[in-house]
Amino acid sequence: MNYNIAVLAGDGIGPEVTKQAIKTLNAISEVYGHHFYYTEASVGAIAIEETGNPLPEKTLEVCYNSNAILFGAIGDPKYDNNPNAKVRPEQGLLQLRKSLGLYTNIRPVRAYEAVMDRSPLKRDRILGTDFTIYRELTGGIYFGEKNLSEDGTTASDLCTYTEKEVERIAHLAFKAARTRKNKLTLVDKANVLESSRLWRRVVTEIGKSYPEVEIEYLFVDNAAMQIIVNPSQFDVILTENMFGDILSDEASVIGGSIGMLASASIGDSSALFEPIHGSYPQATGKNIANPIASILSAAMLLSHLGLTEESEVVNKAVDIALDKGIVTADIDPKSNYGTEEVGDYIASKIHDIDNIKPLNKENIDFGKSTII
Ligand code: IPM
Ligand code: MN
C-alpha cells in the first residue's frame, strides 16, 4: 500500500528524533513492501524564522493531503522568556490541532520492566502500570475567550465545553476501554466547575451504551495523587484539555523518562503522532535525545493506518532495545549509545523480523531469544 506521511519535525531535538522514527517506518516498508511518501513541512520557531508564521498555510496543506502526520517538537527558549512575544512556536501546534480538528489526544503510559528502576517511584508502586489518557485537545481553557484588561492588571481565560465536544471523545474513550480492561475514569473538578458537571452528565449518559465498561469519577486533585500512589488501578483516563496536559506530564514519571511517552492526536479526517516531550533545546544536535517516544509514536501511526502487525513489530523492537540496554543516557547514564545508534538498532531488529514477530514475545520475555 501507498501512504502519504507529512513530516513536521519542528524545533530543537524534533528533527533528530523524527529521523529515527522515519528509519523505523522505512524498515517496516522494506520488510512489508509498503510505500511511505514523506513530505516535510515547517512548524514552530523554525517556521517563524522562515515565514513569520508558526503554522504556514503550506504546512496545513501538506497535512490535509496526508494519511498521517509525524510531528517532532516545537519550542524555543527565546520565546519562553519573552512575555511580550506576539507570535510563539506553540501557537503553531495549537492552530494545527484546531484546524485539523484533532480533538482526541491519546497518551499511553506503561511501566517498562527495563526502565522501572529509573523511575523516582518505587518499583512495587508502578509495577503493572498500563493505562491510556484520553485528553480532549481542541476545547476548554486552551481555546476559550482570552482577555487582558487595558491597564494590564486583570486577565482571564474562559473554559467552555459543548455536549458535542464531550460526546465525540467520550465514544472513543469508551471504545478503547472495551478493548482493554473495561474501566473508564473520568477526571474532572465537578465539585467546583460547571464545565466539569457537563462532562459528568454527558459521559454518564454515553456510558449507558457501553454497559460492560465500569465508570469511575475522580476529582483532578485526587487523580494527581492516585497516579503516583497507585497507578496500576487505571485503565482509560478520560479528561478535558488542561487536566490532561498536566496529568500526562505527571504520568510520564512512571515510565522512567519523558523520552518514552508517545501520543496520537485523532480527528475525523486527520491524525497526528508525536512524542509528548518538548524540543529540549539544550540537547539539540548532541545525539543524546531519546528517540523512543518518537519511534513509539510511529508505531501508533502504523496502528492508525490499520497496520496492526507492523505496529506490534515496532513495539517489540523497542522492547528488545530496552531489554538489551541499547538506550540513551536518560535511561542508562552509563550508556554510550546515542539517538542515532538507538534508532539504527531498532530498525535493524525490524529487519530481523522472523525473530521478533509478536508470537515470539514469550521467548523474548524469558530471555530465550536468539536475536543477539
Ligand atoms: C503538550 C504541550 C502543548 C500543550 C504545548 C506545547 C502547547 O505541552 O502537547 O502537552 O500544552 O498542549
Ligand atoms: Mn504538555
Image (cartoon, rainbow, N blue to C red):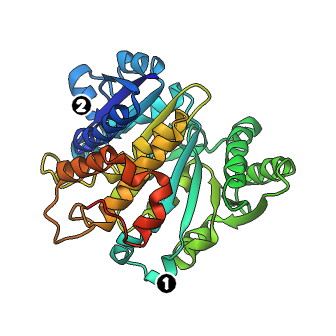
Q: How many C-alpha atoms fall within 10 Å of the one at disc 2: few (<14), some, or many (≥20)?
A: many
Residue at image point 24% right, 52% down: 345
Quadrant housing residue 189: bottom right
Which residue corresponds to mark 2? 46
- Nearest the viewer among 197 and 65 is 65
Report x, y in % for residue 151.
43, 41
**First in sequence: mark 2 or mark 1?**
2
What's the distance in space between the residues labelled 2 and 1, CA to CA?
A: 43 Å
Q: Which quarter of the rendered picture does the C terminus lie within?
A: bottom left
Residue at image point 41% right, 27% down: 34
Q: In this image, 343 relative to 119: left or right?
A: left
Of badges 2 and 1, the one in the foreground is 1
Which residue corresponds to mark 1? 124
Residue at image point 40% right, 65% down: 364
- Nearest the viewer among 20 and 218 is 20
Q: Is residue 300 visible?
A: no
- Nearest the viewer among 342 and 353 is 353
Hey, what amino acid is under mark 2?
Ile
Task: Say above or below: 318 vs 169.
Answer: below
Report x, y in % for residue 74.
31, 40
Q: Secondary structure at mark 2?
A: helix
Hey, what amino acid is under mark 1?
Asp
Report x, y in % for residue 196.
71, 53
Q: Secondary structure at mark 1?
A: helix
Report x, y in % for residue 360.
45, 58
Q: In this image, 172 relative to 313: left or right?
A: right
